[in-house]
Image: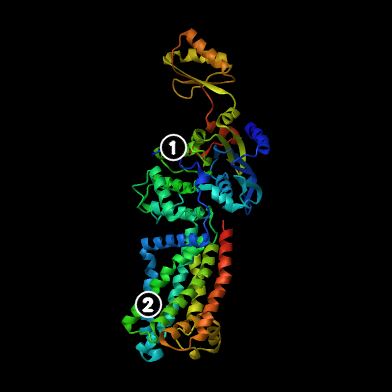
Amino acid sequence: MTLTKEPIVATSRAANPARRPFGLVRHSLALARRSLIKTMRTPEQLLDVTLQPVIFVVVFVYLLGGAVAGSQHEYLQFLLPAIMVQTVMFASLATGVGLNTDIKKGVFDRFRSLPIGRSAPLIGSVLGDVIRFVVSIVVLLGFGYLLGFRIQTNPGAALLACLLVMMFSFAVCWIFVLIGVVMREPGAVQGVAFVIMFPFTFGTNMMVPTDTLPGWLQVWVRINPVSDVMATSRGLLIGGPVAGPVTSTVLWSLGLLAVFVPLAVRAYRRRT
Amino acid sequence: MRGLSADRATLATVTNYAFQAEGLVKRYGKTVALAGVDLAARPGTVLGVLGPNGAGKTTAVRILATLLRPDAGRATVCGHDVVREAARVRRVIGLTGQYASVDEDLTGLQNLVLIGQLLDLRRGDARKRADELLDRFDLTEAAGRPARTYSGGMRRRLDLAASLVGRPDVIYLDEPTTGLDPVKREDVWGIIRSLIRDGVTVLLTTQYLDEADALADEISVMDHGRVIAHGTPAQLKHIVGGQTILVRPVDPDRLADAGAILEAVAGQPAESPHRGVLTVPVDSDAAFTTVVRRLAEEGIGVVELSLRLPSLDEVFFTLTGEHTEEVAAA
């Protein structure tokens, strides 16, 4: 212990830096970096986003491909763009669970005692988890390529498809952030999130064309915004109409953000 | 209780407190965590908040650190209201939680740089400040290791360092030595003393009576969500009343003679808490001089002879009628 050095605290006021602009952006990015460092230090956290797309593709393509499309190769082209949406959405679920665990630790108390925006720790967590989206898309497209999936449009459109899917999942993420902040236990967060996730991801034309479904389910599939995101992904990866689905995807993303970001921040502010 | 009422009077008239809480109330459902708590410290002093588990110490700290809103009452830090001007309060405080609040996955250096960046330091300055603090707290060698690999004492030091990044005027130390072994406690005490020398105002909560006695300028004793006594350590000891004379004769055979002298001076029989030692409570220090003279006249040599105030432990027992957990465990 070197206690005889110059004062480390006094002379404080003068030494304090002037306030710099764009605080929320800088603070959120600093916290996103923290999140990223944590992910890099424990790469097993990426196991779900690495394994899940592989398992889903294998199960669906080889189990259902023959029956649904007559050809596994054909079915892969139809299924993979939709699986991409499902996979990235599932990747966003973990943000809520992780945040719930994190908030209980003392380090979040420290963040709350600092002069930073109340939303910064939440934005930081969500931004940091974008790496999970990227990893899952890379794994999925790579694995799909090995099995014979081919992008039938162009690289620009494919990139746009990835970005739009990530944007939508980024928006969905805030639903799970809200749940993560409100719930007491990580297990409960996981449970509730799954209950929400299943009808939205499986209640789509992901695996079979809509017109093969019973009437009531067709109604749901047409209302479900995730169907539009999957149509966006298909259109931009293997061709098809895109204008409508893309517009719908963008609007839904903005709408979800407008509703759930304020709700999540308010819930976080109130949590004691 | 005398100490408390005396201070209530000054609390209203003097306004230059580094932090001041008045009538804080906090309820959780039917549980009352705080039932009207007043706490205050002048700039550059240490307020010790002493009490057993569940007394409400942490709740009070969390309100003063803007982490919790009081249901009633008000609190200011450096003149800023903790509810209405929370952002300003956050600029002048440092918080060290009951359990080391550092990020276990980040290295010591990364932890401190992150806090610096959140406090609006430029990256280079944040790095410089982090290096300074790591050096000061003897963590330079461990700077590149994740905090999860740190020992308990190292974590506390990193935690303290993290709360100092912003050069705060007021620091809350919530049970900073709970769970540390005696050597590590001494370490932390040394750090706290150096903070005091730097002119920081400290709120220190503790379950250890000796810790409050060693570090605090004034002590508020809390129990069941209330401040049951307040004063300097010496004032608190006076509340228990009087002083105690302790005598240990060189020759154990003269114990009875020494006892007779003590009884004659104090007007009550002496007790023997340990073999070969006699103690007796007295009302004034004049009695001590008399005892010294009489022992000399009788030719009784002593190896130990002292006039002392009661321990804070005895204070607590007198105030609450209960022993603290520490005593119960001992």
Res. B168 in view: no
Residue A140: image tag: 2
Q: Residue furthest left?
A: A146
> Which element type, helix, strand or loop, lies under badge 1?
helix
Question: Do the residues under discs 2 and 1 have CB atoms within 8 angstroms?
Answer: no
Q: Residue furthest top?
A: B297
Is residue A227 or residue A171 the one in the foreground? A171
Residue type beneath disc 1: Gly
Above-or-below relation of B231 to B21: above
Asked where in the image residue A256 lies, by quadrant, the reply is: bottom right
Residue wearing tag 1: B190
Q: Residues within 10 Å of mark 1 (few under 14, many from 20)?
A: some
Q: Horizontal and vertical percent for residue B111?
A: 42, 53
Q: How crowded is mark 2: few (under 14 residues within 10 Å), some or many (20 or more)?
A: many
Residue A9: image tag: none
Residue type beneath disc 2: Leu
Q: Horizontal and vertical percent for residue A151?
A: 37, 84
Above-or-below relation of A190 to B175: below
Q: Report how far apart the C-alphas of labels 2 and 1 lie in the structure.
A: 56 Å
Q: Which chain carries label 2?
A: A
Judge left or right: residue A98 versus residue B149: right
Above-or-below relation of B261 to B26: above
Q: Horizontal and vertical percent for residue B264?
A: 56, 13
